[in-house]
Image: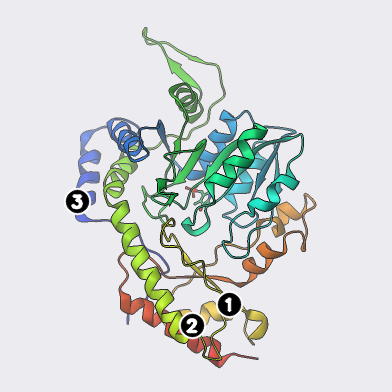
Amino acid sequence: MSFLPFTRPTIDEETIAGVADVLRSGWITSGPQVKAFEAALSEYFGGRPVRAFNSGTATLEVALALCGIGAGDEVITTPLSWVATANVILRAGARPVFVDVDPVTRNIDLHRIEAAITPRTRAVMPVDLAGLPVDRDRLYAIARPRGLRVIEDAAQSMGASWGGRRIGSMGDLVSISFHANKNMTTGEGGCLVLNDTDEAALAEKHRLQGVVRDADGGMDVDVLGGKFNLTDIAARIGIDQLKRIDAFNARRRELARRYFERFAEMNGQPEWECGLPPADFGNGNWHMFQINVPFDRLRIGRGDFIRAMQEREIGVGVHYPAIHLFTAYRRLGFKAGDFPHAERIGRETVTLPLFPAMQSADVDRVCAAVCDIIAKNRK
Ligand SMILES: *Cc1c(COP(=O)(O)O)cnc(C)c1O
């Protein structure tokens, strides 16, 4: 039995050959492949302007800069995400204002947002955890009348939709990641969906040192940009991945369904007490399949559980411990008890394997292993 990782990118020989072509072409950093990738992404997002970046974190940083967010500003976000979501707010000089998650969706609880708005609030940055979209209708019904910008951290929700419309094809600024573990990848990379061509031009400046070139071969710099451009090598991978994203996501949905079927069979057995994600097959892209393991009713902790899975040749992940309990955030005054739902989920969450090349039998093996470990370790 070979080791089953919790995720693995699907890269085919055509992509490998395509990357070799780029390497041989003599132009390997940002160039024609990036332009072609951006055009294909724009088409995927209904014609909206899109710019490619070298990470999803970079797209978030640039999105904050485009909104003019800095010292003294507040950005409302979720404590249950990859830490990049909150780090970029702090690095911009602003303050993250966390709002606890809905314990069912695990996404920011939109009902609690209004109470968190102050005169300093400039933007809301929701996250589609595991690719399960936040309710876009409700989100914009809160943000728009109050003049708040929305930076959708859609890092995980490439190819997901809300109300039959693709995430990225609507809304304000939409940031997506193409990290190796995401549903489509460029190795490292990301893209930002923008509102208009002026905003896209400004994003380009922020992407590369603020440089604007003129027709005489000169240049000017009027904003302090960073170094966030994507290479043509990476863009070439992305062009192929984009063609396959909907098929990848369809396969992920099939595998997620199988998890639910298997877990439903185990449900009712005394040892089966895990929390499951919402069974949403209309909107989400099943970026991850996370269960909550009730460690307070087991004799083992999460580390032991992860090791027991590894002994059974299965890799699992943890996405994510609550951000506000990290040392750098506690120093800002955040503490245990601030966001109880995020904290509990952060303690209990375990990400089971889910990626397009997985077999149905792999799902069965994972479910059996989880059940067996829980059965053997009840208090
Ligand atoms: C992956 C991820 C990011 C950051 O993307 P990178 O490409 O790794 O920089 C930001 N937010 C969330 C929710 C993510 O999952």
* Between discs 3 and 2, the one toward the N terminus: 3
Position of residue 99 relative to residue 35, above or below, is: below
Count all numbered tags in the image, as a single digit: 3
| Circle 2/circle 1 CB separation < 8 Å | yes
x, y (%) of residue 159?
Answer: 38, 50
x, y (%) of residue 77?
Answer: 64, 48
What amino acid type is highlighted by mark number 1? Val
Q: Is residue 300 visible?
A: yes
* Between discs 2 and 1, the one toward the N terminus: 1
Residue lying furthest right: 333
Q: Please indicate whether residue 18 sits to the left or right of residue 292 in the image.
A: left
Q: Viewer-nearest of labels 3 and 1?
A: 1
Q: Viewer-nearest of labels 3 and 2?
A: 2
Residue shown at 36% from the left, 47% from the top = 186
Q: CA distance from mark 2 to mark 1?
A: 9 Å
Secondary structure beneath label 3: helix
Q: Please indicate whether residue 190 sits to the left or right of residue 68 in the image.
A: left
Question: Where does label 3 land, which residue?
Answer: 14
Task: Give the class, few, some or many, for how many residues have Cα within 10 Å of label 1's Cα (few <14, many ≥20).
Answer: many
What amino acid type is highlighted by mark number 3? Glu
Question: Where does label 1 land, which residue?
Answer: 293
Task: Give the class, few, some or many, for how many residues have Cα within 10 Å of label 2's Cα (few <14, many ≥20).
Answer: many
User: Toward the viewer: 136 or 318?
Assistant: 136
Question: Where does label 2 land, which residue?
Answer: 370
Quadrant of the rendered structure where residue 287 is?
Answer: bottom left
Residue shown at 63% from the left, 65% from the top = 103
What amino acid type is highlighted by mark number 2? Val
User: Toward the viewer: 156 or 178?
Assistant: 156
* Between discs 3 and 1, the one toward the N terminus: 3
Q: CA distance from mark 3 to mark 2?
A: 37 Å
